[in-house]
Amino acid sequence: MAVAEARAAPAAPSLPVAPRRGAWSAFARHLLRDPYALAGISIYVVFLVVGLTAEWLAPYDPMEILFTPEGGLAASLPPGSDHWLGTTNLGRDIFSQLVMGTRPSLIVGLSAAVAVASIGTVVGLLAGYFGGWADQLLMRLTDIVLGLPFLPFVIVVTALLGPDLHNIVLAVAIMLWPNAARVIRSQVLTLSQRQFVEAARVTGAGEWRILFVHVAPSVLPFSALYGAFAVGWAILTQASIAFLGFGDSSAISWGTMLQDAYASQALDRGQFFWFMPAGLCIVLVVLAGFLVSRGYEDLLFPKLRDDK
Amino acid sequence: MTELLAVRDLAVAYANGTVHAVDGANLTLRRGGMLGLVGESGCGKTTLARALMGVLPGGARITRGEARLDGTDLVALAPAERRARLWRDLAFVPQTAMSALDPVYRLRDQMREVLCDRGGLSRAEADMRAAELFEAVGLHPRRLADYPHQFSGGMRQRAAIALALALRPKLVIADEPVTALDVIVQRQVLDTFRSLSAELGLSAIIVTHDISVVAYLCDQVAVMYAGRVVEHGPTDAVLEQPSHPYTMGLMNAFPDLESDEAVLAPIEGSPPPLSDPPPGCRFAPRCPFAEAICTREVPPPVTLAPDHWSACHRAPEAAALRQRARDPLTWRDVAEAAA
Amino acid sequence: MSTTLEQPLVAAYGLTKHYPVGRSLRQALRGERPVLRAVDGVDLALRPGESVGLVGESGSGKTTIGRLLLKLTEPSAGQVAFEGEDLGRLSRSATLRFRQRAQLVFQNPFDALNPRFSIGRTLTEPLSNTGVPKVEHADRVAESLRHVHLGDPARVLERMPHQLSGGQLQRVVLARALVLRPRFLVADEPVSMLDVSVRAGILNLLRELRDTLGLTTLAISHDLTLVRYVCERTLVMYLGKVVEDGPTAQIIAKPAHPYTRALIRAVPRPYVDQPRDALPLHGALGDAASLATGCRLRNRCPHAFDRCAAETPPLAEIAPGHRVACHLHTT
């Protein structure tokens, strides 16, 4: 047979290891070149570093009631060299609270992001790729969830299960996965029409292999995008819950700080140093999520493969 | 004066001006003529057409040259003035008619928009004219009441042509008007153009990659390669006596329905990157007849017959080169030399 | 020329594929389920080593036939046999063996390769999918690259698809099909997305592979000139049915079916002096969902008579190896 004869020719080269990371590193480079995305990522990095080193950064225990050298309660002190952002009306150091409050915010934000991205991706992939009754079932489920009011649902969940952070994450994940799932499903529907998917099938690839090796990598950027959205939403939700008084009042977070300041009438007394920093941090983290997703948009909507 | 359009040394640059999609293009079109603008993808034919229309995509601009339509240099006009001339002087038929037609309006309303708003006709006059136009392109005037999605692909293309003709433009530019269509429908659209040319004296530039479409429809042809027009002349002269090696190569690469077992010869290699084109003749790296001068100097147009020119240093020897170009081996040698 | 008695490599019997289409409220109330008859009772047989062209306009069902023959979609009725085996009853391992023997060349090389895979990975994937031992992979990949004349394998394998030109990509697509050493190759519009100067190279390659590897090929195209160049035999499809089948040269020189005649006349030629008279066919492509009986061309055919509406013309032989489905030829 001709096929066999043709093999006599020069020694075959060894197959190179396929550069799997190619697409992702190009993606990361692109993202870092976008000024908005870069700003967003920088904000995340700063908060991440603060959260990780909070113990060292915070000069005081955030719950400790402090006294002046004269022995009086160090209450409602304005910002100064001892207390950078002043103290609360109960004599607690606001800067320490702000630094320590980064942690629950980040924990809530990141775990919600992971949860939303993974649930949304898995559901979107299955519904989009296999279609049929699985698609019907999953998409009707998203319809139901999309019909639920966001904050009331979270309040009910935390009221029933307790105000722990992981319950807030759970509630946020339940509320936010459908958006990710829908977008990923529609991406999968488009990708399934691509000829390289048919090519994988005709060369003997199984359905699961096609789904995870050929289709899934192209939707991961969308998962990341919805994850980035979820960070902001989750932090905002946790703060709202805390502010409304449904949160865990024993744990320090930006939300409980706001609630504390509000309950203590810091607004009326013009103690901007008390509630402004926490409010600003929330705004920054939420903003970072949107900045990153803005950077993604430029990447996702023109076609990916033209980047050189 | 029978010359309707004269393009001289037109150049269009993208982005920061380093990439010239069109770099010194020359062409002429006589009144009532049909000019086929042929070339491969990326040769700049669509950019040239868009530059003439004044609808270049963002970031692209004309950097030099002129394009005189009836004596007026379009390049020198202010953008607002150019837009005012759209439909009236120049009209465009895109590759997919769907992008020329608005899906949410009936064809009659789209016709009225052009005829009344731009042409200043009354509604009744506009409807009469719309019916005439539909008849001219072979559509029943009754179909004016339909939405674009109710038309088949070929009918949609003809509706787009009717719309382009609404204000009796001096020149219609059609970008790959039949590429997306099946053969039979393609033939119907081509015949629409042909009858418009015969009956209304339509002047048109047909941008296409298909030499057969040009042969069927056009009396003039301009062959583009890497941003320049390399050969220009009457269709029969250019197709029967191609005088630029690129045109010869294209003719060789084209299968014909009845040619008996003739072996096709591809033009080896690929067009040069427009960001860094070779000096001299841009086809030289793929040309089996390239000589030292070809890689040094840009070949000027050589007139071979009235209206027929070729931008090739060896154009005077074209007859001999044609003989050699018919042999597929000639083209294979270039590939081997390159490898 | 092989004899007709030889067992066909690929054969289809009454092959039918219907797709459900949107129904009106009235149809829904009556419980009707309208279908698009993409492929409607097609019989065909490809002999080993034969090169066959499948010609038709978009909507004729030609691409669906290709997908049915490759078991990329299941027929609504009828069956496909490959080397005598019914494709509908293949076990999982038999399916993988079938995948090694029957391959597809895609229309759009810019879409047919996973943009995230290097060429090397693209060419290895079919081998690992079908269980070819790993030690053979490098040899097989190099062999397939040689078949498609893709320069220096060592350099090509590390490339990503966006670094190659359209012609090179189409060669990679061909190599991916050949790496499994198939016997049967379906090429669906293999050059329609390529530039004119590159087309000739791919067409020559298809011819060469057909001859040197003894492949049985089915070239699906709307372009008769392409089919003329690479196929000995041609099937013409109209709205889900084969209307003419015969040696390519004969079909082009003496088309017997009115549709084939129009199709051939409609092809523009690359020279100025060509016939430009009106096509012997009127109207536009009919609606495949609506015509259930009779000849499907009858509304457009200048020769149509009573019988054309009453009975569906069978595909009947009018000359050795030349069959036509038209009442003008049945007496």
Image (spheres, grey):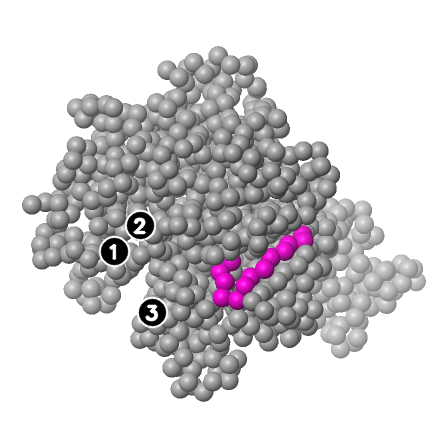
Could you tell me what secondary structure mostly forms the magenta stretch?
strand
Report x, y in % for residue B282.
65, 42
Q: Nearer the viewer, residue B72 or C308?
A: B72
Local SS, label 1: loop
Q: In this figure, which residue is indicated by the disc labeled 2?
A: C265
In the displayed orientation, state which residue is furthest to the left: C331
- Given the image, on which type of amino acid does mark 2 rest? Arg
Location of residue A288 by image quarter: bottom right
Q: Are marks 1 and 2 in contact (CB under 8 Å)?
A: yes
Q: Quadrant of the N terminus of chain B?
A: bottom right
The chain letter under disc 3 is: B
Report x, y in % for residue B143.
33, 72
Write down the region rendered in magenta. B23-35
Q: Is residue B28 magenta?
A: yes
Check chain identity for marks 3 and 2: say if they share one.
no
Closer to viewer: mark 3 or mark 1? 1
Report the Cα–Cα distance between label 3 and label 1.
18 Å
The mark that comes first in sequence, 1 or 2, is 2
Local SS, label 3: loop
Report x, y in % for residue C61.
28, 47
- Given the image, on which type of amino acid does mark 1 rest? Pro
Q: In this figure, which residue is indicated by the disc labeled 1?
A: C280
Q: Is residue C301 magenta?
A: no
Q: Nearer the viewer, residue A176 or C320?
A: C320
At x 40%, y 62%, the residue is: B194
Q: Which mark is residue B139?
A: 3
